[in-house]
Amino acid sequence: MSGAYRLPSGGRINRQKPISFTFDGKKYQGFEGDTLASALIANGVLLAGRSFKYHRPRGILSAGADEPNALVGVGRDQAHYTPNVRMTMQELYDGLVAESQNRWPSLMFDVGAINDMLSPFFPAGFYYKTFMWPRKAWDAFYEPKIRSMAGLGKAPTEADADRYSQRYAHCDVLVIGGGPAGLAAALAAAESGARVMLADDQPEFGGSLLAETEATIDGKSAIDWVAEMVAALKARANVTLLSRTQAFGYYPHNSIGLSERLTDHLANPPAHLPRERFWTVHAGEVVIAAGSLERPMVFPENDRPGVMLADSARIYVNRYGVKPGKRAVVFTAHDGAYRAALDLKKAGIEIAAIADLRHHPEGPLVEAAKAAGIDVLPGTSVTGTAGRLRVKSATLARIGADGSAMDERQVECDLVLMSGGITPSVHLFSQSKGKLRFDEHLKAYVPGRPAERERSAGACRGLYALSAVIADGFAQGEGAAKSAGFGGVTARTFAVAGTLESDPGSFLGAAPHGRDASRVKAFVDFQNDVTAKDIRLATREGFRSIEHVKRYTTTGMATDQGKTSNMNALGIVSEALERDIPEIGLTTFRPPYTPVSFGAFAGASRGDLFDPVRTTPIHGWAAEQGAAFEDVGIWKRAHYFPKAGEDMHAAVERECKAVRDSVGIFDASTLGKIEVVGKDAATFMNRIYTNAWTKLEPGRLRYGVMLREDGFVMDDGVVGRMADDRFHVTTTTGGAPRVLAHMEDYLQTEWADLEVWLTSTTEEWAVIAVQGPNARKVIEPLVEGIDLSPEAMPHMSVAVGKICGVPTRLFRVSFTGELGFEINVPADYGRAVWEAVFAAGKAYDITPYGTETMHVLRAEKGYIIVGQETDGTAVPDDVGLGWAVGKAKKDFVGKRSIVRDEFQKPDRKQMVGLLTDVPAEVLEEGAQIVADPKQPAPMTVLGQVTSSYMSSVLGHSIALAMVKGGRARLGETLYVPMPGRAIPVKVVEPIFFDKEGVRLNG
Amino acid sequence: MLVIPCPYCGPRPELEFRYGGEAHIARPEDPSTLDDEAWGAFLYLRSNPKGLHAERWRHIHGCARYFNVVRDTISDTILASYKVGEAKPDMDALARILAGGPRAAAGEEKSK
Amino acid sequence: MVETAIRTGALDALSARAPAIAAASLRTCPPASRFNFRGRPEAFGPAGEAFGVALPQTACRAASESGRHALWLGPDEWLLIAGDGEAAEIAAKMESALAGLPHSLVEVSHRNTALEIEGSHAADVINSGCPLDLSAKAFPVGMCTRTIFHKAEIVLWRIAENRFRLEVWRSFAAYVWAQLEEARREYGA
C-alpha cells in the first residue's frame, strides 16, 4: 500500500504500478505518476530538508518548479548523483534513492540548528559585518569555515557517468508551456501549417488543467480536453512536442535554450540514451505561455513543515491523489485559496478556517466556501505557528484598521495553506529584454513592450479566468503564425463551464501580526533564509535600490531565483520606504529559469571530444615508436622520441647530436600552408610581407616576415615561388588560420582589384623534414625527376618531382642550420613516404626527432619563433629581422608603423644571446633580466629570457633574450634574479653555432 | 545566438561568423603621407556607439566573404546587411525602423 | 627501384569499427580528386566546361554530371570533386582552357576526407553540432555549404532527402567522426 495519506481514488497516478523508493535510507512506496514529493506526502512525510542558514526544518512548500525547500540528493552512486534536486520535479521510479541535505547527523536531529538559536547574531549582512577583523583570520579560519557550512547539497565525488546530448532546432513558432494557453496556441499555430515546437517542463501536457476537476471545456472534462488537444497536435507532422523540457533561457534573435530530461524518470535508463538534451531553438516567433506562480504569505513561522502553498495542496489532492494533511487552516488574501479549500474539503480534509486578510471578501468562491460550511474569517491574519518538525497549530488574530492584532486564538491543524496571490511568470519575457509594466490591481508585473518577436499568452500576462486563458492562447498562437508568414487559421471558440470566477486581487509584502517584530521570523526567501526583518533592516541601513537590497540580504539569490520571494520582498521594501512598487523597480531576471546541469551545457564536448585533437598523417608512426607528444594549439606534435631508459633531456641530447652528426627526420606537417595564385600574386605578396618578392625566381624560396598594420611581427615562414603566378606560402603552426584571415581581409576589403586567390593547403601536404649532413644521401635514391646536386638545387630552392613514386614539392630548406630538405607529399602518402625515408636512412642511423630538439637546433642558430621571441610588441628590427624588410618598397602592411620614430630608438628591447658563467646552468624561460641585482625591489627590469636550452653540441646552455638596448650591450654582464640568488649572464650575439653558415651547404 | 544575414548565403547562425570591427574604415591610399597622429587614428580610433553601428563580419565558416551589417548595440537587432564596397545605408532611416519594434526590424508586419 | 608509397586515409581505422545503425548509418567515402577553384566571372564558364560540370551560380548549390561534382562555396569559389586519380588530367584540361583568364586552381585531393551519413535521423545527428536549419525547405536536396559541426568546419551537402555528405579537413576527420558516432548512438537501440 502506498501510504496512509493516499486518497482512495482520483489523481493522474497509476495505482496498478506501485513503486518502491528510499528517502534517507527508509523504504517507502508510491505509484507510477508520483513525484518524489507526492509519494512522500502519501506516506505522511512533509519534512524534507534543513534550511540554508538557520538549519530550520523545512517541508514541501509547492508542487512545481518553484520549490525552494524540498531539495534532495538523488542518485544510485556518486557517478550518477545530482544534488539539489527539487522533490516536486523528480518523478518516482523503482529503486529511486534520495537523501536530505544540509543536516548532520540526521534530518530529525541536526546540530546545525544551533544557528537558529543564535539567529539574533546573524542579521542581514552578517558576513560582511563580522568577518572583517582581524584580517588574517579570514584566510585561516573564517573563509574555510564559511565554505564548509555554505551550500546546500554535496557535489558528487566522481565524474558524471551519464551522457548528454545537444541539438540545434528551428521552428516558425515555439510555444513555451503546455497548459491551457500553450495548448491552444500550439494548435492555432499548427493549423496554419507553421512548424511548431511545444515545450513543457512536466511529464505530461496540461499544466494547471492536470489538477482541474470541476471545469469543462467544450462539454468535456478538462483532462479529456487536454488529451484531445495533445492527440491533435501529435497527429501533425509539423509539430514537435517536448515534455519534461524546461525553457530556461531567452537569448537574442529568438534563440531559446531548452533542457530536456530524457532518463531521470527511468529506473534502468538504456545505455544508448543520453540523460539530458540541451536544445538551442531558433524560432521565428515565440509564444510564452509559462503560467503563473503562487505567492506565499509572509507571517511568523511560515516556514514550518506543513505550511504549504494553497494551490499546490490542491494539486497534490487532485493530480496525485494524496492528502497533504488532515486538518488545514487557510491563510489568504486572494480568491484562489478558496478553490483549494473547497477541493481539499471534498477530498476529506477538514478546513478549520479560512483566515482572509481582506476585510470584505466576496464573490462566488467565497460564497461557495461559506455554503460548504467553511468558517470564513475576514480581516484575519495567521500570526504564528507551533510544532517542532511539523505544524501542530496556527495562531489566528483579527487585524484592526491600525494593523493591531486582536482576539488571538490557537487553532489545531497539521496543515497551513497560504496564498498571497498570483505572480505571472514573466521571467522569460524579461530575459528577452521586454519591458515589464506593474499592474496595480493584480499587484504584479506583466509583460509590456516586447523586444523580440514574442507574445505572452494566458496567466503569464495576468489573465486568470480559464476561458480567457484558452481564448488568449489561441489568439496569440494564431497571431504568432501570422507574423511568421502563415495564415488561414479557422476562428475557434472554446466553451468553458463549471468554474467559478475569482477576483485576481491579492496582497504583497508581510502580513500584520501584532507581535514583537524583532523576535519573529517571517520568511520571505525560504531557500536563502531571508526574513521580513532582514529586508526591513537593509532599508534602515540605507539600501534603497532593490538590486542592492537583494545583494545585501541575498533575497532571491538562491537556486530558485526568488520565484516565490521576489514580489513579497518588493512589497516589504515598498512599505518600509513608503514608495510605490514601480518606483522600487525590479531585479533583473537572468537565465537560467531553473538550474541546468553542467553536463547539458557541456554536451558531448568532454574528455576526448572536448576539442578536436588534430594529428598529422605521420602521428600513428610516432605513437608506435613511443614518442612523447606535446600540444601545439589543438595539434598533437611529437615532442621527443625517448629510447628505453631515456628522459627528455637524454633523448633531446641524442636527437640533436644525430642531426648535427648525420641525419634526423622530423614531422613538419602541421606548418600552415597557403597557395597564393593569380596574375597579381607577387604584387599581393609584396604588400602583405615585408620582403620584396618581384625578383624571386620560380623554383626559389625566401623567408618571409608578416606584420600587423601596427608594425608588430605577426607571423613568418618560408615561401616558395612555384611559378610566376603561384606561391607556396608556409606559416607557423598556430598562425595558419590567423594569417589566412589577415590575407583575405586585405584582399577582399582593400585590394579587391587584385587578381589573386588564396587556398589553404595545410592539410593537403604531409611535410617530412630530413636534416643533417647526410640528408641528401638519404633521400637521393627515393627521388625521381629532381637533380639534388648543390648546383641544381642550392639552399633555399624548391623543385617538383616524385618521391617513392608519388608527387612531391621538394624544398631545400633548413631550420636547423644543417643541410636539409622538406619533402611535401600529398597527405595520404605521408606515412608511407616517411617510412621509406626512415628505411633508407637506416644506413646513416637516421634519428626521428621531435619539437624539443627542433627548438634547441634553431636556438643554436638564433632563428626566432614568432610568439616566443616576439610577444606582439616587437618590430622586425627588434628581433634582428631588419634585413628582411624591403627598404625600397613604398608600402606594405605595417610599413607606416615601423618607420615611426618610436621604433628607431636604440633602447628598444632587442634580441640578444645570453651565456651563463656556469655551462650547465639553464636559465628559466620568462625570467627577468636586470643590470644590478642588488637594487631594491621593484627592480628596473631590462628584459626577459625568451628561449633557453642546454646545447649538447656546444656543451653549454644557451639562451635568447629580449633586452633593452641589447645590441649595444654585447659583452656586458647582466643578471637574472632568482629566488635567493642572481645568475650572472654575458650578453652575446644571438647565434651560437656555425656563425658563418657553412653547414647549410652540406 | 544571433542570426546574421549574409548578403550571399542568407540568414545564418552566429557560430559561422567572425566579428571584424567597425566598417567603413578604409586603409589610406598612401600611408606614408599621414602624420603619426592621423595614422594612429586610423589604427586605433573607433566610434563604439550605443545604438546603430556599421560593422564588419566575415562568414568565415560559410562563403568566407567579409561584409557589413548595421546592428543596434543595445538590442543586437540587425537592420541591414550589405556587401563590401556598397554604400553605408541611411542610418536615420534604420533608426526609425528600429523604433517600430522587433517585427518591423525583421521586415515583417510593417503595417501593424 | 623504390616501391610506390601506399595511401593511408584519415579514417581507415575508425570506419572499420562503425556499428550498423540504420537510422543514421555512417561510412567513409572513397578517395577522390578535389580542387578548389576560384576566379573572376569570365573564368566560370570555361572552368565548368573543362571540368565537365557547369559551375552552379546559385548560392549554396551543388551540381553533378557523370560522377563529377561542383559545389558552390562562395561567390567566386567552388569545390570540385571527381574520381580518384583524375586530378592530373583535370588540372591539365582546365588550366589549358583557362589560360589567360583570371582564376586559381589548387588541388586539395588529400586535404579533405569525406564521409556520408544516411537514414531517417541523419539530419538530427548532424544537428547535434551543426546550427543550420536542415528541414527540406531550408536545406533542400542539392544544397551545400561550409558550416560548423561542433568545433570543426565542414562542407555539408545534402545528396538525398536523408543522405548527407560531409567534407572535412583531414586532421579534423577523426573528431567529426567521433562526434557523429556519439550523436547517433541513441538511434542504435
Image (spheres, rainbow, N blue to C red):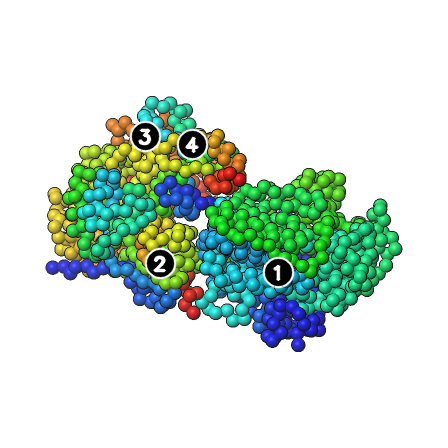
The image's mark for residue A218 is 1
Question: Is B80 in front, or is A886?
Answer: B80
Q: CA distance from mark 1 to mark 4?
A: 54 Å
Element class at badge 4:
loop
- Residue at 59% x, 62% y is A225
The image's mark for residue A895 is 3
Which chain does the numbered disc 4 sit on?
A: B
- Residue at 43% x, 37% y is B80
Element class at badge 3:
helix
Identify which amino acid the numbered label 2 is placed on: Glu
Please determine whether, in this image, residue A133 is positioned above or below residue C24: above
Q: Position of residue B2 (x, y in %)?
A: 46, 45
Q: Badge 4 is on which residue? A: B89
- Report the side of A604 relative to A665 (left or right): right
**Residue A998 visible to the viewer:** no
Q: Quadrant of residue C179?
A: bottom left
The image's mark for residue C161 is 2
Q: Are marks 3 and 2 on the same chain?
A: no
Which chain does the numbered disc 1 sit on?
A: A
Q: Are marks 1 and 4 on the same chain?
A: no
Graded by Cα atoms within 10 Å as few (under 14), some (14 to 19) or many (20 or more), the crowding at tag 3 reads many
Q: Position of residue A382 (x, y in %)?
A: 80, 56
Q: CA distance from mark 2 to mark 1?
A: 41 Å
Identify which amino acid the numbered label 1 is placed on: Asp
The answer to the question of whether label 2 and label 1 lie on touching residues, with beta carbons closer than 8 A, is: no
Identify which amino acid the numbered label 4 is placed on: Pro
Which chain does the numbered disc 3 sit on?
A: A
Q: Position of residue A346 (x, y in %)?
A: 74, 67
Element class at badge 1:
loop
- Report the side of A961 relative to C90 (left or right): right
